[in-house]
Image: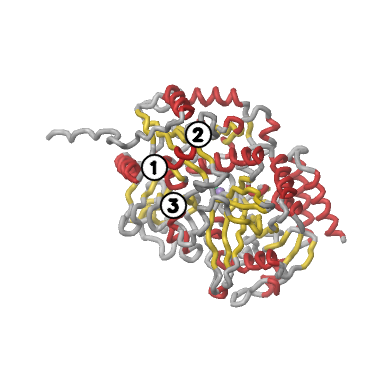
Amino acid sequence: MTNPAPAIFPPSGIGDARPANQAVLDWVHDIAALTEPENIFWCDGSERENEFLIAESLNQNVLIKLNQQKVPRSYLHRSNPNDVARVEQCTFVCTPTKEEAGPTNNWSEPSEMYAKLRGLLKGAMRGRTLFVIPYMMGPSDSPLTKVGFEITDSKYVVLNMRIMTRMGEIALKRLGNDPNAEWNRGVHSLLDINPERRFICHFPQDNTIISVGSGYGGNVLLSKKCLALRIGSYLARTQGWMAEHMLILGVESPEGRKHYVAAAFPSACGKTNFAMLIPPAHFKGWKVTTVGDDIGWMQIRDGRLYAVNPENGYFGVVPGTSYKSNPNAMKSIAHDTIYTNVALTDDDDVWWEGKDGPAPSHAVDWRGNDWTPESKEKAAHPNSRFTTPMRNNPALDSDVEKGDGVPISAIIFGGRRSDTVPLVYQAFDWNHGVYLGATMASETTAAAAGTVGKVRRDPMAMLPFCGYNIGQYFQHWLDIGKRLSSQPLIFNVNWFRKGVKSQFLWPGFGENMRVLKWIIDRCEGTGGALKSPIGWLPSPHDLDLAELDIDHKCVAEILGIDHEEWAKELAEHKIFFDSLGGVVPKQLLDQRERVAARFKE
Ligand code: OXD
Ligand code: MN
């Protein structure tokens, strides 16, 4: 028997979309000289290239083909079990001085970190292909849009970046030939997926990211947390705009009045669910549409804040996603989706804890082991993910590609708090709102490695993502407020408050529309509220609770503020501010004093 002829790698016309910009070519040349790959593959983002890379990934077991009747054009990837979440302890902001990175970031002196990373990258791509991914963050005609290049030795990264960004030709066109044009340099190598050699490093002054030793999305899809948030927030401050860990949604009334709101929640607190909310039957004629589910870039125009979603897809948490919790997400991930670390059923479908219907009697779990409902281990990893293009979302907002962005009427902060924090309240003004954001906290989740369920302060949900000194970041927020003649109203929400029996007091999901409606009413000047020490609070009859099966005692409890709990909370705000070592602007320290004084009135 003769061996089949070896495949020609890559077939002609694939992997040769070399950019014209000499600065990019020189940089790729440098990285290739360092990493010594077998091939260089210049990605163009085309359908043909994607098909080729999927076929290769199936051959090399990087992807598993799913049942194409059940989930057309969808695949499963299993990551190394040591590599399933963002690793904040391995994430660095490398600025000339430690003060520039500030008290909340791991810091390293840039030349030392470059030397260490160059040592790790030396020869790292021997026998591998070096992929060059040109990508664009933001709509093609937006002044906020940024171009990045990611070099990677992972096909999984290329396939995901094609979903998450506007990749290929469109980015090359936007960059053009100017050797001095602004673009982000991103280098990623899997190395040997060893937690000891895992570093995710940002060099804001050089617009550069280097990530080694991981294959997990949040660490390696450099467009997302690394560029759009860490480097993005640094650029935003120097250039006068905002890069935030925020979903953006549109709410339209039956009469056709439309508002947009941006909302910051820490990882895995239901941002994707909120961004895709379907109003309950009682809200007939109301529509919620998604602009983005994770990141908002905002600029000031005519004294107002306008937001764009820089991404092109969703990288969402799978467990708990169902037709009950998020029908739009279920429809979005029913095709053209890459699943990471979910379970595989015997008929090659995907399964996870919290999916509709009964659990399968047998499956293969995220590690590749046999699983049955009696197994002690979870079938899907708690941080298993879907990567799906935003065009799959039935509720996609019609202005998602609008370069100017959408006007923001309200900003919402929120976290996962079992106690203390009421369902919703409104800040008295912008600076008070910045204080709400700066002191927000949440119980930790599986999105980041470490303990789950511990309350940690997570200012504006940016603790792991602010690429510079958090004190200057707070000041940037205060400064933006001064430049706005029409400021969005600022709110805080908590869907997760629990009662004495540890039961959730609020049904959440689609019913969050009732809270959103109050927020919109406040924006329109029609919603009622009571003045409380912590802000404007709705009384139970200010919320539209019609046709909701909820106990009146529950409503009172969830809207209540307990003075003892708040005394503790305010003490914790002080401990947090103090822990930042004197970087917190005086206006925010004063805000805390004012809340404390209002409790004494
Ligand atoms: C995410 C995160 O993946 O915030 O969006 O961790
Ligand atoms: Mn996120």
Kind of element beneath mark 1 = loop
Looking at the rendering, in which quadrant would you find the C terminus? bottom right
Q: How far apart are marks 2 and 1 (CA)?
A: 17 Å
Determine which residue is flagged by label 2: 186
* Number of residues whose C-alpha sits closer than 10 Å to that of mark 1, classed few (under 14), some (14–19) or many (20 or more): many
Q: Looking at the picture, which amino acid does disc 2 mark?
A: Gly
Marked residue nearer the N-terminal end (2 or 1): 1
Q: Distance between the residues labelled 1 and 3?
A: 15 Å
**Vertical placement of 451 versus 556: above or below?**
above
> From the viewer's perspective, is 330 left or right of 204?
left
Count the labels in the image: 3
Looking at the rendering, in which quadrant would you find the N terminus? top left
Marked residue nearer the N-terminal end (1 or 3): 1
**Residue 594: where, in percent of width, then height?**
83, 54
Determine which residue is flagged by label 3: 388
Which disc is residue 469 wearing?
A: none
Q: Looking at the picture, which amino acid does disc 1 mark?
A: Gly
In the foreground, 469 or 416: 469
- Residue 449 visible from this viewpoint: no
> From the viewer's perspective, is 225 left or right of 337?
right
At 41% from the left edge and 59% from the top edge, which residue is drawn? 373
- Residue 51 visible from this viewpoint: yes
* Number of residues whose C-alpha sits closer than 10 Å to that of mark 2, classed few (under 14), some (14–19) or many (20 or more): many
**Residue 438: where, in percent of width, then height?**
71, 48
Q: Is mark 1 within 8 Å of ligand 1?
A: no
Q: Nearer the viewer, mark 2 or mark 1?
A: 1
Q: Looking at the picture, which amino acid does disc 3 mark?
A: Thr
Determine which residue is flagged by label 1: 45
